[in-house]
Amino acid sequence: MSQIDLLRLDGSREAYRVGEASPYPLTYTGQMPRTVYAAAHVVADSIAQTKPWQSSKVDWDATLKFRHHLWGLGLKIAEAMDTSQRGMGLDWHGAKELIKRSLQEAKTVPGADLACGAGTDHLDPANVRSLDDVVAAYEEQLGHVEACGGRAILMASRALCKVAKSKDDYLYVYDRIISQAADKVILHWLGEMFDPHLAGYWASSDVDVAMATCIELINAHPGKIEGIKISLLERSHEEKMRALLPADVKMYTGDDFNYADLIEGDGKHHSHALLGIFDPIAPAAAAAMDCLAKGDSAGYHAILDPTVELSRRIFEAPTQYYKAGVVFLAWLNGFQNHFRMVGGMESARGILHYSEIFRLADRARLLVDPDLAVERMRQFNALNGV
C-alpha cells in the first residue's frame, strides 16, 4: 500500500496509508431495481481554454468517453444539468453542443439512455420583462433537445423565479411547456443551497406551500410527467412529497446527503436517483443497486453508506461548488488527464477540502488505481506548497 503526506482539515499533516484498489467492476452485468441517472460533468479543454473565466472550451472526446463509462455501468445520464456547470462555466451555446453530441453518441451504444436539461439560462434574468419571455426561452431549449431526439428535464429557471409573482405564474409557464412537449418530462426543483438565485421557487419560501403548488402542477398533467427530482438536502421533504405523487410519477432523489436511505425506501415508498454524486461513485452505485435488487440490504448499505460521508463533504456549503470535487475525483481516477474546469471552477475549493476528498474516497473504496491517485495527489500537494 502507498503512503502519502496528507493534510487534515485543521491544517496538520499525517502520513496517510492508502487502501486497496476499488473492488467494484467498471462494467456492469447486474440488476438495476431503480431508475438511476448520473448527472455527468464535462471535461475542459485545458489547452484551448485560454480565458477560462470569460469563455469555456470543452474536450469533447474526453467528455463523451466518460459518458461511455457511465453507460457501461448500466446508468442513465442526466445530460447538461448543473453538474455539467450549466450557468456556472458552461453557457447555453456549449450546452447545445453537449446535448447534440451526447444524443448522437448514445445511438452508438446499445441500451444507452439519457435525458437532457432544458432551461432558460441563455436568458439574462435582468432583461426578463414577462412570463412569455420565460416561456419562449424554455421553448427554445426544449425544441433543441427534441430536435436532437432527446427527452427533457425541465430545469428550474432563475428568470422565472425573478419575474413570477404568484403560484399561478409558475403554473402558467410550466403548463405552456409541458403541454407542448413531445414526450414525458422530468421536473427539477433545485433548492437555494445549490443556486441562491432560486430562493422562493414555486412562489413561496415555505416548503410545504411550494410543494403543494408543485403537486397541483403534476396532477394537472396526467401522462405527461415521468417524475420530479427535488434537491433540497432534507430527507423529510422528499419523503413527504413522494407519498403525494400519483402512482405513475417517479420521485428522483437529488439529495446528495441522504440518497442511500431514500433510494432503499421505507417499505411503502422509495425514490429513484438523479444525482451528481453518482458521477464520481458510479461503480459503487451500480454494485449497490445489484445488492438492492437481490434483497441484500446489508450489502447495499455496506457499499453505499461510506460514499455518503464523501458526498456530504463534496456538497458542503457553498454547495454550488460541488462540481469541483466531482471533477477532482475524475482526475484522480484517470478519467481525464488534468484538473482544470470550465469557468476555472477548480479554484472554488481549497487544498484542505481536496485532501479530505482524497481521504474519504479512499475509505469508500473508490480509488480505481491507488498508485495513480497517489501520484496525482502528490502533484497537487506540490502545486499547493505541501
Image (cartoon, helix red, strand yellow):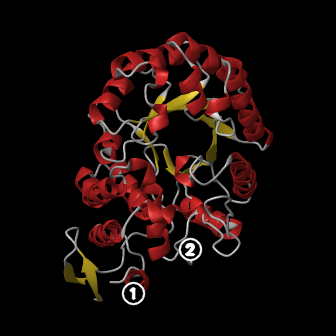
Q: What amino acid is found at the position of numbered circle 2 in the picture?
A: Gln
Query: Residue at position x 70%, y 65% from top?
Result: 60
Quarter that holds the C terminus = bottom left
Toward the right, the furthest residue is: 147
Q: Which mark is residue 336?
A: 2
Q: Where is 284 relative to 190, above or below?
A: below
The answer to which of marks 2 and 1 sits earlier in the sequence is 2
Is the residue under label 1 in contact with that under label 2 (CB below 8 Å)? no
- The one of 334 and 56 positioned closer to us in this rendering: 56
Q: Is residue 379 left or right of residue 170?
A: left
Q: Kindly state the secondary structure of the residue where label 1 is placed.
A: helix
Note whether residue 375 is visible: yes
For disc 2, the neighbor class at 10 Å (few under 14, some 14 to 19, many from 20) is many
Quadrant of residue 135 within the rendered picture: top right
Note whether residue 278 is visible: no
Q: What amino acid is found at the position of numbered circle 1 in the picture?
A: Asp
Query: Residue at position x 49%, y 43% from top?
Result: 35
Cα separation, mark 2 vs mark 1, equals 16 Å
Quarter that holds the N terminus = bottom left
Q: Is residue 120 left or right of residue 29?
A: right
Residue 172 % position (x, y): 62, 14
Residue 151 % position (x, y): 67, 38
- The one of 184 and 160 positioned closer to us in this rendering: 160
Residue 89 % position (x, y): 60, 54
Residue 210 % position (x, y): 41, 19
Q: Kindly state the secondary structure of the residue where label 2 is placed.
A: loop
Q: Where is 178 relative to 78, above or below?
A: above
Q: Is residue 177 left or right of residue 272?
A: right
Query: Residue at position x 35%, y 20% from top?
Result: 206
Q: Which residue is mark 1?
A: 371
Query: Residue at position x 72%, y 36% from top?
Result: 141
